[in-house]
Image (cartoon, grey):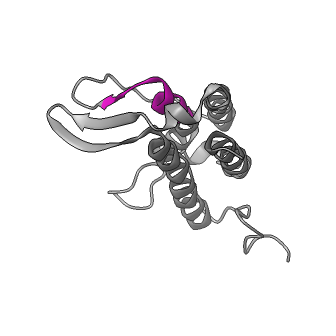
Amino acid sequence: MNRVEVFQRDFEKEIATTRKFLAIVPDDKYDWQPHPKSMTVRQLATHIAELPAWVSMALNTDGIDFATMDYKPTPINDTKALVDLFEKSVLDGRENLAKATDEVLDKPWTMRKGETIYSNDPKADVIRMSLSQIIHHRAQLGVFLRLLDIPIPGSYGPSADESF
């Protein structure tokens, strides 16, 4: 199994788990946040839904410059729109990963803000970071849902809400 195939396998596993979490975000809780420094449910869930497309960004660009980018999150107001955005991002990430080669994974990718360089890593590391971001933020969403008393699905086995 080459590195692209490993990423494909990991991508599909994390996507399946993440889909379960996004599908249970209640429509009436999008503006809720557990703390003033925390993201709202809308901000967090939208970020998670967009993350699978980061795989494509890593593969198809040489980097990102926060000083010049014009990012605007997709407006999300309900769970159907959230899941639709996620599925679009998944398709984008999946299709681009399927076209990737191990040689492309070794090319450098830079994250910067103008002259300030935050990282300059191989594209493989950026893809790994993208998958890690999905996992990390999905766990945050799980905490948000738990605080809202919404039963959460298991990630790598049953959750406390699922029977053993």
131 or 7, which is in the foreground?
7
- Determine the main secondary structure of the stretch shown in magenta: helix
Q: Is residue 83 left or right of residue 103?
A: right
Where, by quadrant of the figure, is residue 7 drawn? top right
The residue depicted at 73 percent of the width and 70 percent of the height is 159
> In the image, residue 64 lies at what x, y percent?
33, 30
The region drawn magenta spans 53-64
Most extreme residue toward the right, as rendered?
Answer: 164
What is the quadrant of residue 154 in the picture?
A: bottom right
Q: Nearer the viewer, residue 158 or 133?
A: 133
Looking at the rendered image, the quarter that the C terminus falls into is: bottom right
In the image, residue 98 sits, relative to residue 41, either above or below, namely above
In reply to whether residue 144 is colored magenta, the answer given is: no
- Tally the numbered discs: 0
Q: Is residue 116 above or below residue 147?
A: above
Q: Residue at x 67, y 31 (%)?
A: 94
| Residue at far left of view | 115
Q: Which of the 4 image quadrants contains residue 141?
A: bottom right
Q: Is residue 105 left or right of residue 116?
A: right
